[in-house]
Image: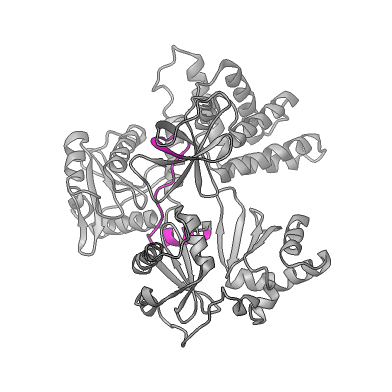
Amino acid sequence: MTRAAVRAFVAAHSGSDQEAEAEIRGVIATFLTDGRQAQQTDGYRLVDLNGYRFVLSHDGTALTGYRSMHGERSPAQYLAGVPSRYRFSRLAVTDRGPALQDVAAVRALPVEQIQVSAETRSAFADLTSDRPDQTDVFLDRLRNALAADLSGGHIETQPRGNHLVLGSSRTWNLSPDGSSVLFVRRPTPLDAETLAAVGLGEADELAPGTELRVRALAHGDHFHWRVTPVPEDRQRRYLLKLRPDDRVPGAGQELDVWVVRRRSGVYVVSASDFGRHEISERSAERCRSALTVLTAIGGDSPTEPPHASVLALDGLVSCCFRRDQADWLSVWRLLGSPSSADLTVLRDISRNLPDAVQSADATELEQLGEVLQSSGWLDRAIAALAKLAGKDSPEVSSVAAPATVLTAELAAAAETDRTCLQHEAVRHQLMAALFGAGHKPQDSSIVDVLRPGEQGPIVYEVLPAGHTSYHAVRSGAVRVREIGQVVGGTPERLHVVLTSPPDEPWIPDLVERVLGISVLWPSASGWQGPGSSSATDD
């Protein structure tokens, strides 16, 4: 149990450090059993229960943080049934009837009769940038948003009877009888994981480097402006970060920007080219030195890397985390566009490496090598070194090393896609259909589904949930063509498989006509789309 977690608990509920630690140890088992759990992109694990949150280390062995929206009572008091002191304040809401027992009853609630506290009004105003006034117009917008989430969102009943209503851009907490809104907030990583599991995930996350056009709304502090995309995107929030030499935009001015990072649910964007320059010769040398460290300790016989290379590895990790170098985006992409969780693993390796090198126990270095292999960082390092070698040697063919470059990128993309539960459900549904039709489908770290054909392999690439727009299907078609370059033999047919019908009915025909890729998707009656016969023919 870290001191930071204990001090956060004391700050929220007062008392001594010893009392805080004793109470945490007394309730943590209940929270682990009854709470909702998820892992953040940085690797830390969250455990939530009715407004109380414990933060655990990536391996679950240490409590690293604590947050609460209930300053009036501690977790132990909550579990013991001690009533909230806010119950008696003017902001309080009280139950007026029996608790609702099923989801259908919650969805059928008349929103015009639900009480809305002043706290909820203020929180909703923060989420929507509206003024929390007392007019009917503001309250109608709030109730309409609640009605939409009650109708199309996911509803969970908490152990204490409260009902969580999870929408795409906000989460509501209703009293057990549904008569009052207790609070509304932005979705947490736990909410996002729950929505993804039931196929109601939020809009696709924008990767660093994604370009878009925005309109400046209002000035924040000296180097930040609130902006909105053109056309407007209500599912995401954006903040323009200015560099000292950037021109200050005027309100209403439109700008071409690119995504730098996502922080606390807000996309930080930049209008400057700083950060996305090509890798300089100096950076390439540092990257090569750092990557050589990973291949040295990740091989079958780990060898001690030079001290300068260890320092270069620290710099490489810092460059991707801080994103404050002129070519950090190119460096990040060189490493295979790793997630925050992947970078956290690399940072842990970098921090533990000096002690492992100096230790007389050779097993410490071997253990780091095992982590490199199991986490995929050894493969990333090999692929990145191959890219650098191609960059330094103009005479090397651009397709000379598909096994080390293209294969590594496709494997990383497949691994990311397979974290989507709906993607995996459709992939296995397709394999079951092929088995039922008398085929012998297979898969690999690169290919979602593959089966033998008369003239060559038949390849299927399954897209994650929500990837049903024309641009998403077109990108999937390009990827399945790349996969066709690294599988054995010339593919007989290539398919893109969606988890749900495409956004527009013309998309499958256009993709097949222009790119020669067949599209199919599951339905209640089997499979649909131009490529549907491929899942059932024998």
Residue extending farthest to the bottom is 98
Residue 76 is covered by the magenta coloring: no
The quadrant of the image that shows the N terminus is bottom right
Tell me where residue 469 sits by quadrant.
Answer: top left
Say whether residue 1 is visible: no
Please name the colour scheme applied to the rendered image: one colour
Picture residue at 56% right of the left edge, 73% below the top: 91
The vertical placement of 314 against 521, above or below, is above
| Horizontal side, residue 11 vs residue 470: left or right | right
Residues drawn in magenta? 190-217
In the displayed structure, 378 sits above or below 496; it is above
In the image, 333 versus 413, the foreground residue is 333
Find residue 121 and report its horizontal and vertical position in percent: 49, 64
* Residue depicted at 47% across the width and 29% down the height: 271
Rendered location of residue 333, percent (x, y): 49, 31
Report the quarter where the C terminus lies. Answer: bottom left
The residue at the point 50 percent across, 66 percent down is: 120
* Viewer-closest of 465 and 123: 123
- Residue 186 rendering spot, x and y as whole percentages: 50, 58
Q: Nearer the viewer, residue 140 or 496?
A: 140
Dividing the picture into quadrants, the one containing residue 402 is top left
Q: Nearer the viewer, residue 221 or 38?
A: 221
Is any part of residue 332 visible from this angle? Answer: yes
Q: Residue 20: where, in percent of width, then height?
A: 77, 67
Q: Residue furthest top?
A: 395
Locate residue 412 relative to residue 51 in the image: left or right.
left
